[in-house]
Image: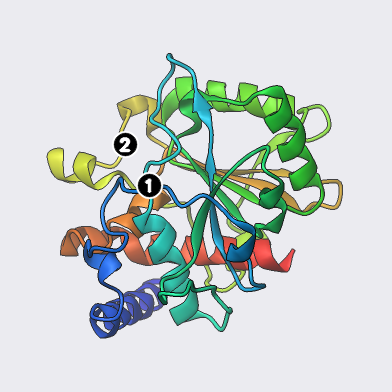
């Protein structure tokens, strides 16, 4: 986006945040969803009512490799991104009986994954999928599902992810390809002109504003994709960047918010709009 569009989006985000803070305490670390940890909200059939539901992928991990686990950014990113989607678009976003935005956790072999229009996967650097997960995730993706893989850094984490995806979507038929800024996903709603490098808030604060978490080995952020035979993106891959922290940490530090949230949300909402329209 150009600077004017970024400024408009940032102003809109700030306005929405100020209006909605009292309505949505979980966005500021309130008692119903704020912060990391807490009870896992596993998907149930009644969670899906036809409106958008944020689904997060839970997975097992190797004892080796470079990365955390599936619950990084959970649950605040899972609340904040649907909140912004509801405020910045006309999309119908699901809420539960308490009025909170519906966000659920699924496994790759769960039959409920087919109810998810969009699935988020974070920190895949040590991911380890079993045979039933491989088969079910492949089927979900080929039948129209959408997986966004985010927040992994450097060569080692990339290699583990690529090895796992080889079993799910063989690269001789479904290769991983770079996405250029002229791809329709970059313009699904906002005109995004680059892939921003968004570090974790702790890394950013602890290094005085650096963005490459693995130094030279993660210097360049990438958006890549695996597409089906009709050129529909099945797997969106954002490597050497952490969009999840732009969503999760929007209320933790004002400067971090201003620096990373506008581009983070612009790309994130584009990804959701693309997933639901393709």
Residue that label 2 marks? 212
Residue bearing the label numbered 1 = 197
In this rendering, does residue 16 appear at all? yes
Residue 231 at x, y percent in the picture: 80, 51
- For image coordinates 50% across by 32% down, the residue present is 124
- Label 1 element class: loop
Q: Quadrant of the C terminus?
A: bottom right
Q: x%, y% of residue 149?
A: 54, 43
Task: First in sequence, mark 1 or 2: give its number.
Answer: 1
Q: Residue 210 versus residue 274: which sits nearer the camera?
A: 274
Name the residue at 30% across, 74% down: 24
Is mark 1 in CB contact (under 8 Å) with mark 2? Answer: yes
- Image position of 27 (left or right of 150): left
SS for callout 2 = loop
Q: Position of residue 257 (x, y in %)?
A: 25, 63
Residue 182 percent across, percent down from the top left: 63, 59
One can see residue 192 in this view: no
Q: State the residue lying farthest toward the top.
A: 64
């Amino acid at each position: 986006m150009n600077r004017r569009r970024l400024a408009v989006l940032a102003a809109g985000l700030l306005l929405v945040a100020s209006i909605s803070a009292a309505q949505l305490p979980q966005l500021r670390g309130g008692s119903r969803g704020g912060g990391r940890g807490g009870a896992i909200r596993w998907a149930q059939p009644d969670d899906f009512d036809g409106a958008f539901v944020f689904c997060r992928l839970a997975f097992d991990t190797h004892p080796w490799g470079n990365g955390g686990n599936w619950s990084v950014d959970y649950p605040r990113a899972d609340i904040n991104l649907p909140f912004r989607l509801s405020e910045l678009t006309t999309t119908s976003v699901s809420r539960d009986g308490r009025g909170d935005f519906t966000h659920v956790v699924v496994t790759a072999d769960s039959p409920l994954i087919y109810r998810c229009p969009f699935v988020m996967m974070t920190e895949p650097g040590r991911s380890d999928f079993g045979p039933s997960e491989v088969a079910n995730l492949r089927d979900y993706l080929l039948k129209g599902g959408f997986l966004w893989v985010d927040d992994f850094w450097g060569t080692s984490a990339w290699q583990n992810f690529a090895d796992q995806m080889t079993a799910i979507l063989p690269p001789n038929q479904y290769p991983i390809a770079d996405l250029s800024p002229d791809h329709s996903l970059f313009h699904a709603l906002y005109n995004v002109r680059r892939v921003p490098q968004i570090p974790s808030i702790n890394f950013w604060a602890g290094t005085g504003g650096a963005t490459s978490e693995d130094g030279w080995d993660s210097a360049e952020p990438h958006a890549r994709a695996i597409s089906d035979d009709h050129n529909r993106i099945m797997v969106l891959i954002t490597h050497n960047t952490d969009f999840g922290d732009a969503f999760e940490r929007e209320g933790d530090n004002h400067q971090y918010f201003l620096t990373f949230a506008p581009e983070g949300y612009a790309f994130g909402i584009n990804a959701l709009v693309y997933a639901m329209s393709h």
